Image (cartoon, coloured by chain):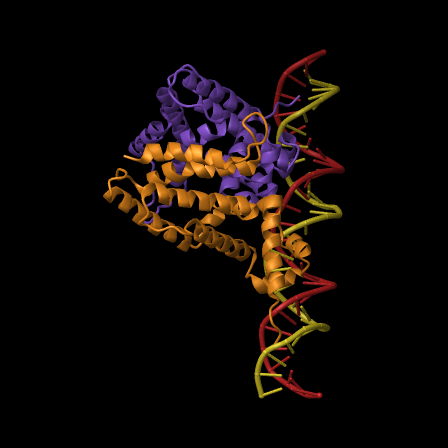
Chain colours: A orange, B purple, C red, D yellow
Amino acid sequence: MRLRDEKKEEIVRKKALELLVQLGFDGFSMQKLAKAAGVSPATLYIYYKDKEDLILRIGEEVGERMVKATFDGFHQEMDLKTGLWVQWTNRANFHLNHYLETQFYEQLKLTPYKDKLAENITAKFSQEMGGFMKNAVKNGETNRMKPEVFWSVAFAPLYNLIRFHMAGKSMGGAPYQLSEQDMKAAFDIVIKGIKK
Amino acid sequence: MRLRDEKKEEIVRKKALELLVQLGFDGFSMQKLAKAAGVSPATLYIYYKDKEDLILRIGEEVGERMVKATFDGFHQEMDLKTGLWVQWTNRANFHLNHYLETQFYEQLKLTPYKDKLAENITAKFSQEMGGFMKNAVKNGETNRMKPEVFWSVAFAPLYNLIRFHMAGKSMGGAPYQLSEQDMKAAFDIVIKGIKK
DNA sequence: AATATAAATGAATAATCATTTACTTATGAA
DNA sequence: TTCATAAGTAAATGATTATTCATTTATATT
């Protein structure tokens, strides 16, 4: 029996991310991927059922890594400010250190592929956030609100800053670069708004 | 001289949006568009130089309509809360009434096409927002901060709620639907955070 | 060392792709 | 009414697409 070459598999994943981001989902193709990864097109079909399977499986893997990173060192019992800041820094670090994964996943979530993504990722999110929120309400740190509202006011500003950073675009001037200072400025505003 | 059929042109634009969102950028093709719009593929090349031109020109048109809608009834001299709320409601109304345009534009801004998008859209944004912010600082309503930070804390929560609504997904339960009540809840938190 | 088996491949498949060509149709101006 | 001209088309172009086939290669087990 011949063993599967794990390194080859990893190169395929990496190059897939690279090409999907660089060329966009419409510029990407199995043949281009095969060429870039230095394998035969047929090899891709050993690893993945078809193109959709490839994109979805890579997407799910990225999603899982993202969630894991987000909740690293986080506990639902943390007080509101601490718990939020842990997630903010975790997220920022992940995104800044994994440009391709972030870019790819953001796109994926907007394409029709999103409907076929396994949902265990969002499940973990909801569960952790739900408990955390409930705690914060019980301790009188914030008012009860829908999870979607909490999520939006608590995290969307950070994600937006990261998106600005990723785009490398400015609002008229030099390309924007996310700094810890900006993160803290935004965080202070967010916390002030959420705290009772 | 034969005149160009404006109705035909409009059908093409509309069907292009429809297909791009429904099939994703990678599922979309000129032949599918031609068929869906009931015209010859060659006709598309009378309206647009090539596929890229088609996507970009439609994107720019959508962007312009979005900006116009956002600043409808808005003046830089408005006080912070009023000005923000005008933009919030404008945005929400536009997005909720123009599902396809919103979905398409969000995707476009993440694909490699974004680098080729004409920038007059962001220019208008920066200009309006810059003046508004400067005013608010001068009047002692908020502290000075980078435009990207202001943008992120002031608008990202709303966009995120809209995204939740669009996705039709929930955080564990029934599909989320944006209500004015939720918008107001989020807005109160945002304003509380931003106001000095 | 022989064998079984899955990995890996190069070359093919038919379908679809973006775009062009040669042609017909409609209409404003003469 | 004729004519010039751009709109519009059906059919074709060659390139690229996703996927498969027939075959070779490597290795774990016997």
> In terms of depth relative to the viewer, which is nearer, A79 or B146?
A79
A140 above or below A68? above
- The percent position of residue B24, horizontal first and vertical second, equals 52, 44
Which quadrant of the structure image shows residue B31?
top right
Which quadrant of the structure image shows residue C9?
bottom right
A168 above or below A130? above
Residue at the image point whose x is 45% and y is 46% from the top:
A90
Q: Is residue D8 left or right of residue A109?
A: right
> In terms of depth relative to the viewer, which is nearer, D25 or B4?
D25
B73 above or below A70? above
Q: Is residue A190 left or right of residue C19?
A: left
Q: Quadrant of the C terminus of chain A?
A: top left
Residue at the image point whose x is 49% and y is 49% from the top:
A113
The reply to whether residue B44 is visible in this rendering is no
B145 above or below B75? below
- The percent position of residue B187, horizontal first and vertical second, equals 34, 30
- The percent position of residue A173, horizontal first and vertical second, equals 58, 26
- The percent position of residue C15, horizontal first and vertical second, equals 61, 54
Q: Quadrant of the N terminus of chain A?
A: bottom right
Residue at the image point whose x is 60% and y is 61% from the top:
A9
